[in-house]
Amino acid sequence: MKTITVAVIALSATLSVARADSWTSYRIPESGTSVDVPVSVFTEMAGKPDGYGQQFRTSDGRADLTVQAVANRQGLSPAEFLARKNPPSGIIYKRIASDFFVVSSIKRGTIWYDRCNFSRGYVHCVLVNYPAAEKRQWDRLVTRISHSLRGG
């Protein structure tokens, strides 16, 4: 009976991610950052990151989303900024362009995804951590979050 209950809870959590039926635009006024956030999935505020922004998490704590803006007073390029963050080895996906970077990998069964867009004066980032076993259910959600990130 216990196994069935756990399976039902896991399935309903996965289905709620796939549906993500309620979204809002989260804005950071100080930097002009904005991003679409699925508030039906990330239901809890989890703290403040460095710079400006907010961290959100799922009610069960299995996934989190950080929306962040940091000053780029030195005018670092995406490649320079990423190098200074000293990313972990073993990055599975990396794309660096003139005005953004995206990196992603898996660590201890969790996919971490980091996208940062660059505008004059600020770096606008979204960081998403979610269970690797649920990758397919999260793909559309992470894509929408990533593509909606704006700063200016």
Image (tube, rainbow, N blue to C red):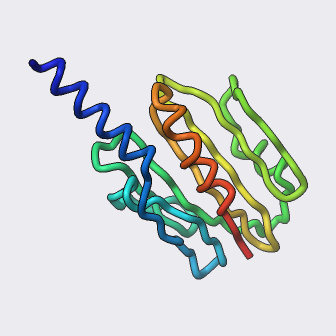
The quarter of the rendered structure image containing the N terminus is top left
* Foreground of the two, 149 or 98: 149
| Residue found farthest to the right | 98
Residue 70: image quadrant is bottom right
124, above or below 127, in the image: below
Q: In the image, residue 122 lies at what x, y percent? A: 73, 69
Which residue shows up at 86% across the image and 56% down it? 77
Is the residue 146 above or below the residue 6 in the image?
A: below
Quadrant of the image occupied by residue 91: top right
Q: Residue furthest left?
A: 1
Q: Residue at x 42, y 58 (%)?
A: 21
Q: How many marks?
A: 0
Of residues 2 and 117, the one nearer the viewer is 2
Which is nearer the eye, 24 or 89? Answer: 24
Q: Residue at 71% x, 55% y: name it.
A: 116
Q: Residue 41 vs residue 140: left or right?
A: left
Q: Is residue 145 left or right of residue 97?
A: left
Give the image location of residue 143, x and y in percent: 63, 49
Position of residue 80 relative to residue 33, above or below, is above
Q: Residue 133: where, in percent of width, then height?
A: 46, 25
Q: Residue 94: x percent and y percent?
A: 77, 36
Q: Quadrant of the C terminus?
A: bottom right
46 on left or right of 97: left
Identified at 34% across, 58% down, the residue is 43
